[in-house]
């Protein structure tokens, strides 16, 4: 039940917001624990809007695992949209946890999920609105320990002054160990607590600056939720989500998720089937998503779908495979995905030419992409979404020309087979060099270079009537690259942007490019020069003290292979000795 004191303090403000249901909690599937009777209190803070945060699968895992412990409590907090933020500021009100309605300062640990670099200023604003000092060094013993995890902490340097500890790698076990130790050391000096938690595998504490190995979790049945809070209105991913596998053996050279989540670990077929049944039953969703970086790479994907199709037959419950590998897409798989409510099928060629796909190590032929598309069309899907990346290292205009060229070849094959042309959407993003990938040393194209390439593609696209191109904002991509490879000096930039009002900047309507250029001049930064800089092999990278297991020398050898358009086979085919299994004493886990 919502506390009367909370209603008295916040109700009149919530009623004035565009979507009040973002801020009230009380969702079906949420935990209801007594705040005063548990020993440890963890607040998961997501630096984005409610509908984005509540869809994040990682936060569902942590929320479920901590709350399963009788002695612990995990609550949630999301970044309020600007209308509610302004009301809170005007009325001098703090942020609060969604279920317990307690202030963040009352928790033992506040954990931020950093999914993308453009959320950094939002983290600082949420700290301010929680009455917690922005800088780690200014916090006192009674303040909660501020931690951060997620893909962006692969380079913690830009956020080090603001975060007490970073969770490197999988968070299933480490967050519980962290909370347990903080509770046991309650009353100790803050620096002593930080020293002790730095000894937990997978915890990096900037104050001590130790080299830190990532944490690797086993994908067991009991560490996957079968119920999670269901939002009061449609969220971004309004479906039951079941994780098939973690990691990707394809090792696309631009892909950070592939390299920092090694080794590949698959859930057992039996576990996936049972988890799906329970999750759908417990939540009432009419769609479930089998989540992975490459869903149809799972060794037993066809058998999994056969069993689930049999179980849900006639129920109107549909399956979604969010990421399809064209070389693993078959007529059988298309038939198994045959469902009453057909959504768009997504295929990720990433590049238009085979040469470019060899450079990025996509290992996909043009024939495989076309055949996968035709299989979908023949099985009743008339909406196809392709993902492409432009501005990749060693890219030429000939490579770009083959993006619309690929669409024309799909249309030609449709004519030959007497098929109706599909509606094709091409989502085209801009390459961003990411830490811990073979392209971490590469330059990003300048804004002018990207704009020229976008105009080039638009002119070619005009000849094709059944395709729509959606381009990512190149200026936002440049800022992402600036943050992604930044050193600790970039923290000054983040702080200045926060002071000048930067907030929820991953949303186009909140991104003030002029403000970035203003801060750039004040602090004497050159954003474009840093984003477009190519680094040498012997350059000391700001994230060299964070170890995800892959040898730096192996990453460089992959960069050199990219120069020559030489591909590397997936590690499921043959071990490439990248170092992760040897360095972290682990191994891949396949279902079969």
Image (cartoon, rainbow, N blue to C red):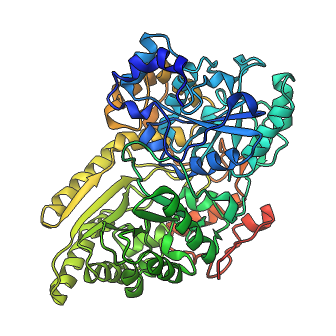
- Residue 381's quadrant in the figure? bottom left
What is the x, y in percent for residue 26?
Answer: 50, 37
- Residue 244's quadrant in the figure? bottom right
16 or 419: nearer the viewer = 16
Vertical relation: 216 (above or below) 498: below
- Residue 466's quadrant in the figure? bottom left
Extreme-bottom residue of the structure: 417
Vertical relation: 383 (above or below) 207: below
Q: How many marks?
A: 0
Q: Which residue lies at the image location 79% right of the left edge and 62% below the top edge?
A: 583
Quarter of the rendering occupied by the N terminus: top right
Extreme-top residue of the structure: 91
Quarter of the rendering occupied by the C terminus: bottom right
Seen in the image, is 45 located left or right of residue 517?
Answer: right
Q: Which residue lies at the image location 55% right of the left edge and 76% below the top edge?
A: 298
Confirm whether residue 103 shows in the render.
yes
Q: Which residue lies at the image location 35% right of the left edge and 28% below the top edge?
A: 512
Seen in the image, is 380 located left or right of residue 295?
Answer: left
What is the x, y in percent for residue 490?
Answer: 56, 30
Q: Which residue lies at the image location 38% right of the left edge and 77% below the top edge?
A: 337
541 or 495: nearer the viewer = 495
Vertical relation: 95 (above or below) 452: above
What is the x, y in percent for residue 541?
Answer: 65, 45
Seen in the image, is 424 located left or right of residue 439?
Answer: left
377 or 4: nearer the viewer = 4
Confirm whether residue 530 shows in the render.
no
Vertical relation: 375 (above or below) 12: below
What is the x, y in percent for residue 434?
Answer: 54, 50
């Amino acid at each position: 039940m919502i506390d009367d004191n909370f209603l008295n303090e916040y109700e009149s403000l919530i009623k004035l917001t565009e979507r009040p249901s973002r801020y009230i909690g009380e969702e079906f599937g949420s935990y209801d624990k007594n705040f005063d009777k548990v020993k440890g209190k963890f607040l998961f803070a997501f630096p984005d809007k409610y509908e984005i945060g509540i869809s994040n699968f990682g936060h569902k895992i942590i929320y479920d695992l901590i709350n399963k412990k009788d002695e612990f409590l995990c609550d949630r907090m999301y970044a309020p949209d600007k209308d509610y933020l302004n009301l809170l500021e005007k009325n001098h009100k703090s942020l609060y946890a969604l279920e317990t309605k307690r202030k963040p300062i009352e928790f033992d640990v506040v954990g931020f999920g950093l999914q993308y670099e453009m959320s950094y200023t939002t983290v600082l604003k949420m700290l301010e609105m929680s009455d917690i000092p922005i800088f780690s060094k200014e916090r006192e013993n009674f303040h909660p320990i501020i931690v951060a995890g997620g893909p962006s902490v692969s380079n913690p340097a830009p956020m080090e002054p603001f975060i007490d500890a970073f969770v490197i790698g999988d968070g299933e076990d480490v967050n519980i160990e962290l909370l347990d130790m903080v509770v046991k050391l309650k009353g100790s000096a803050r620096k002593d607590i930080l020293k002790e938690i730095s000894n937990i595998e997978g915890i990096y504490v900037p104050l001590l600056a130790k080299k830190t190995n990532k944490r690797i979790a086993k994908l067991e049945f009991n560490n996957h939720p079968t119920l999670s809070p269901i939002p009061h209105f449609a969220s971004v991913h309004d479906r039951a989500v079941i994780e098939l596998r973690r990691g990707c053996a394809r090792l696309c050279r631009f892909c950070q998720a592939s390299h920092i989540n090694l080794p590949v670990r698959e859930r057992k077929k039996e576990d996936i089937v049972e988890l799906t049944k329970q999750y759908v039953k417990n939540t009432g969703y009419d769609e479930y998503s089998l989540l992975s970086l490459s869903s149809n790479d799972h060794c037993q994907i066809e058998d999994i779908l056969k069993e689930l199709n049999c179980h849900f037959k006639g129920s109107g419950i549909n399956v979604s495979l969010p990421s399809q590998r064209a070389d693993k897409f078959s007529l059988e798989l298309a038939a198994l995905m045959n469902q009453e409510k057909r959504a768009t099928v997504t295929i990720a060629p990433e590049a238009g030419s085979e040469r470019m796909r060899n450079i990025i190590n996509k290992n996909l032929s043009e024939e495989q992409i076309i055949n996968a598309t035709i299989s979908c069309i023949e099985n009743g899907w008339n909406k196809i979404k392709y993902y492409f990346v432009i501005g990749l290292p060693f890219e030429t205009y000939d490579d770009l020309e083959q993006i619309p060229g690929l669409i024309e070849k799909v249309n030609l094959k449709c004519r030959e087979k007497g098929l109706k042309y599909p509606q094709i959407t091409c989502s085209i993003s801009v390459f961003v060099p990411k830490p811990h990938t073979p392209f971490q040393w590469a330059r990003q194209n300048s804004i002018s270079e990207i704009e020229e390439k976008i105009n080039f593609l638009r002119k070619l696209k005009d000849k094709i009537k059944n395709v729509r191109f959606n381009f990512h904002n190149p200026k936002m991509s440049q800022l992402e690259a600036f943050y992604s490879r930044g050193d600790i000096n970039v923290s000054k930039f983040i702080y200045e942007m926060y002071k000048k009002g930067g907030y929820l900047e991953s949303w186009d309507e909140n991104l003030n490019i002029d403000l970035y250029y203003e801060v750039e001049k004040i602090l004497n930064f050159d954003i474009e020069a840093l984003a477009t800089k190519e680094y040498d092999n012997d350059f000391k990278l700001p994230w060299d003290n964070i170890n995800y297991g892959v040898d730096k020398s192996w990453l460089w050898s992959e960069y050199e292979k990219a120069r020559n358009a030489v591909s590397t086979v997936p590690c499921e085919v043959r071990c490439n000795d990248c170092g992760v299994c040897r360095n972290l004493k682990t191994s891949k886990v396949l279902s079969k």
